Amino acid sequence: MSSYQLGLIMNSCISIIGVTGVFAITSLAGMFSLGQAAYLAIGSYVTFILARMFNLPIFVTSIAGIGLSALCAYIISVPTLKLRKDYFALITMGFGQMITATIVLLERYTNGSIGYSRIPKVNHLVWVVLGITALIVFCVRNLKYSRFGRMCIALKTDEIAAKSFGIDVYRLKLRMYVLASAVAGIAGILYGLKNRVILPDSFGWNLSAEMQIFLFFGGTNSITGAVFAGALLKLLPELFRTVTLFGQSLQEYRTIIYCVLILLIINFRPSGVFGEYELSPKAIKLFVARNRKESNHG
Amino acid sequence: MVEPVLQCTDVCMSFGGVKAVDTFSMTLNPGEIRGIIGPNGAGKTTIFNVLSRIYQQDAGSITFKGQCIDEKDQITVARMGLARTFQNIRLFSGLSVLENVKVSLDYAGKYSFFEAMFLLPRRFKQEKLTTERASKCLEVLNLEQYTALRPANLAYGLQRRVEIARALVCEPSVLLLDEPAAGLNPEEVFELIDFIKQIKKLYPHIAILVIEHRMDLIMNLCEYLYVQNFGTTIAEGTPSEIQTNDAVLSAYLGEEE
């Protein structure tokens, strides 16, 4: 496979990880975060700066990177999770902007807006990325079908009813937000390893918005949808790379394409392409059995 | 003397200028069924919301299992063993009937976040246990054939029963039923009476407090009644005493000219 194709695979995997993280907050805990890109930034900057400063291997410093992402999420969410959902979304967006601004200001360590480069090369990175993606999707999927997933869906539908069954709404939301941010941190590290350079601009609020859009496109309650949309929508602009419109590659119109897609989804399929549907061996068996029955009748 | 499981003295609650509940006092002993009746707007649901700590009362105090719960929140009280249903059914629409019942056992689930993520053996064992407990409870309420369905696909009467199952499954000390017969047809009301009697037989220690409009249900089930009107208790006593009480008759039927 050419390195271009490998790059595409890694890009879509990283996107899947990011969207899966957003799934944990938005689809499970019912919160809307517009600042997830900040945790990608924290994860990757901390990992690579520490690795160079103390001459440590990346997989050691990545623990610090992921940990700091989670810690920041914890500090941010303790006072803000009691706010109404819309205020929470605003705060996360502000936090995202704050982080990119901080990265530019800490020029001494981060190289500011020029970008932090000379990230060490990892061999067979594509396998690492694929493995981590599979692991994260597996974990979040299991979470959805555990007591935590059930409690999340309950609190998302009706907080007062959830509380009257002993569910500690605040603590559960906090856990989910910290988890999602740690996952975002992992995505950030992989992003850095793949591109070998990280810029504050690559973790702007449009990345956060992009992940939310992917999630809504795929299906608000479906991990299958999150994976599908994360990969497909990330690859879609690549398909249009060679097509030009008004003298520009169609790739430049990415944001417009996403917006049109989201408008179509909201109008015609408000719960996303997959809705609540999940792909599982059992579901496939059921689907095959139903089709066979129908063809027998025919 | 039995120690009352739930007791409140002189509870007051007002919204702005409206006194929804005025000096309400009651006791509930283990294994007893008591009822609160009264016309619309008499403050019955407000009493429930104060008891389950959704509202903080303005005055008066509540004791649950010998502990004062005036400062406790909804979650703590629920975990202490106070379960309730809602007048306007509040089932979780994103979960199946079985999951709706399981979710009420979930806060006490005995496997961690980590075990859930990596599908460790304890997760399967504990999930199996909760499924068994929930299925048993659904069987009591004759709902076993609906376990996989979403509540929205069930008839109204069945949804009410799922709500009762969800409150009952954690075997609470006190069960608050908020108008369990609202919107049911006469046949379903008879079924419901049978179910509540069944519950009382199977779980003899549970104390039940029920709000109702339907006289047939109240008179059939309750051992003791509180009659509310415009926030105040106008009468209390056994069903036969209430049936002949003048104040109650005038509240329900109007005064004779």
Image (tube, rainbow, N blue to C red):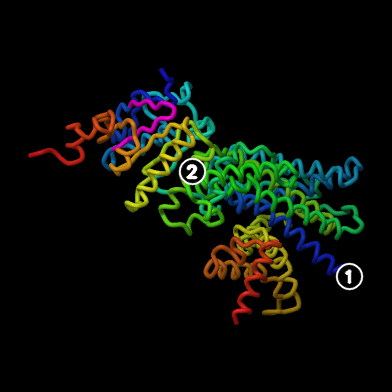
Residue A274's tag is none
Image quarter of residue A53: top right
Q: Chain of mark 1?
A: A
**Separation of marks 1 and 2 at Cα, in angstroms:** 53 Å
Please provide percent x and percent y for residue A235: 74, 69
Identify the image quadrant of the N terminus of chain A: bottom right
Mark 2: amino acid:
Ala
Q: Single out the residue that lies furthest toward the top.
A: B1
Please provide percent x and percent y for residue B72: 49, 28
- Residue shown at the point (84%, 45%) measured from the top left: A49
Say how many tags the image has: 2
Q: Is residue A97 visible?
A: no
**Magenta-highlighted stretch: main secondary structure?**
strand
Q: Chain of mark 2?
A: A
Please provide percent x and percent y for residue A113: 76, 53
Q: Single out the residue that lies furthest toward the bottom.
A: A298
Callouts 1 and 2 on one subunit: yes
10 Å crowding of disc 1: few (<14), some (14-19), many (20+): few
Mark 1: amino acid:
Met
Q: Is residue A278 visible?
A: yes
Along the viewing direction, whichever of A222 and B207 lies nearer the viewer? B207
Look at the image and give the residue range highlighted in magenta. Answer: B25-37
10 Å crowding of disc 2: few (<14), some (14-19), many (20+): many
Identify the image quadrant of the C terminus of chain A: bottom right
Q: Secondary structure at mark 1?
A: loop
Please provide percent x and percent y for residue A234: 72, 66
Q: Secondary structure at mark 2?
A: helix
Image quarter of residue A205: bottom right
Residue A161's tag is 2
Q: Is residue B78 above or below residue A232?
A: above
Q: Which residue is mark 1?
A: A1
Q: Is residue B187 above or below residue A159?
A: below
